[in-house]
Amino acid sequence: MDTFQKLKDFMDTVPQLGLSGIDCIIYREHEEIFRYDAGYSDIENQVPMQPNALYNIYSATKIVTCIATLQLVEDGKILLTDPLYMYLPEFKEMYVKSGTFIITPATKHIRIVDLLTMTAGLSYERDTPQIRKLFEEKGLDFNTREFVETLAKEPLLFEPGEGWNYSFCHDVLAAVIEVVTGKSFGAYLEEKIFKPLGMKTTGFSVAEEKKINIAPQYEYNPITEKLRRISSDCVGVIGLRHESGGGGLITTLEDYILFADALACGGIGKYGERIISENSINLMRTNQLEGKSYLDYKKMIPAEGVGYGLGVSVVMDAAKAFRLVPDNSFSWGGLGGVHVFIDPTNKISYFVAQHCLRSPKHLIEPKMLNILYGAL
């Protein structure tokens, strides 16, 4: 019997959940060991999933941003404990919001590590007075740096390091990388991550001749369990020149798995290039939260035995989490239904793509990983 037949059978049931289609690729130690898809890329025209399709990966971008940041740490250009204002002066004098009307000066400075761990006190709110003002003044014609300057004008939700909130932290990291390197965020990623790993189709924009490969994008309604087709534009990018470190990349399965595979194999890619050290990966996959920050995180990820490292969900205790995956494996996903899982212990990397906003991933991902590790 095919080792992965149960995984294929399960994937065949995914479209029955009311979704469009699903595509999965798995590597073990630089070699592809599984690739299978089910359902349709284009439901209306009954077009099957396309192997070279481009997907908005939304928050799966964050892992790339974290690795780019850790590269600068390894180069001695920044410290994780550095205050953010050393690189972005607009964050030096911050305020904290308490209740509806009370705003007081912050007593702590945001550090680089606070951005990586989502403990900076920022939010993901787009409809704020300062962002509205940015739109009024610039329309959509602003870049990453200008967007981040706007974020600094809003009060924090809590003192840095004293809570956890999913937010624009990784967009701010992108601006830090631009300041430190003197390059656009996209140019830095191309030089230091994409090109060394052989990732030829990943970036913040798509060449005109490749736009035909962008998969149709849908939105799932959990109440009606129905889909509606929407624009294939990335909703994570706010400005025309905004290279979002939190959610702006577009890529293919065969490209992104090269990145995941490198992290599963100690930082060395399929073609022999090292992009990061094993020490940095180990730091990344170690839980960084405690106290109120950890309790805040559990409101979003309620599973026992699971923590948050540097931009990733970390399995601290698989037995407590009731999962078949190994301890210290790590993962993250994206609004459009993608999910990446990395297991350095067994050098396994796994990437699933859908193009469906608000996909019910909780009905899919845990089961797929249990099936995978049951087979292995």
Image (spheres, rainbow, N blue to C red):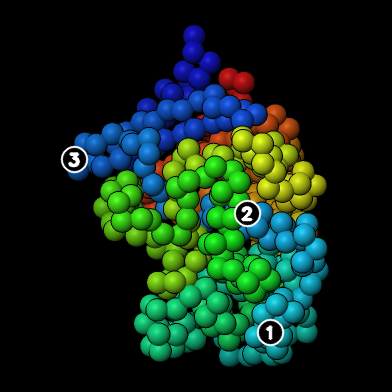
Q: Looking at the image, which is closer to me, 298 or 164?
A: 164
The picture places residue 124, in percent across and down from the top left corner, at: 53, 70
Mark 2 surroundings: few (<14), some (14-19) or many (≥20) residues within 10 A: some
Q: Where is residue 329 in the image (x, y as percent from the top left)?
A: 69, 39
Q: Answer yes or no: do the residues labelled 2 and 3 have beta carbons within 8 Å?
A: no
- Pick the front one: 362 or 108: 108
Against 176, is 233 above or below?
Answer: above
Residue 300 placement: quadrant: bottom right
Please give the name of the residue rendered at 61% of the width and 34% of the height, measured from the top-left corner. 270
Q: Label 3 belongs to which residue?
A: 45
Q: Which amino acid, mark 1?
A: Pro
Report the mark closest to the observer, 2 or 3: 2
Q: Name the residue under label 2.
A: 192
Q: For the residue marked with disc 3, what is the amino acid?
A: Asn
Disc 1 designates what residue?
89
| Disc 2 element | helix
Which amino acid type is shown beneath numbered disc 2?
Lys
Ranked by sequence position, the earlier of labels 2 and 1 is 1
Can residue 275 be seen here? The reply is yes
Identity of the residue drawn at 40% across and 43% down: 354
Residue at (61% x, 58% y) in the render:
65
Q: How far apart are the alpha carbons under marks 2 and 1?
A: 26 Å
The one nearer the camera, 86 or 235, is 86
- C-alpha span from label 3 to label 1: 52 Å
Q: Which of marks 3 and 1 is nearer the N terminus?
A: 3
Q: Residue 73, relative to residue 129: is it above or below?
A: above
Q: Distance between the residues labelled 2 and 3?
A: 39 Å
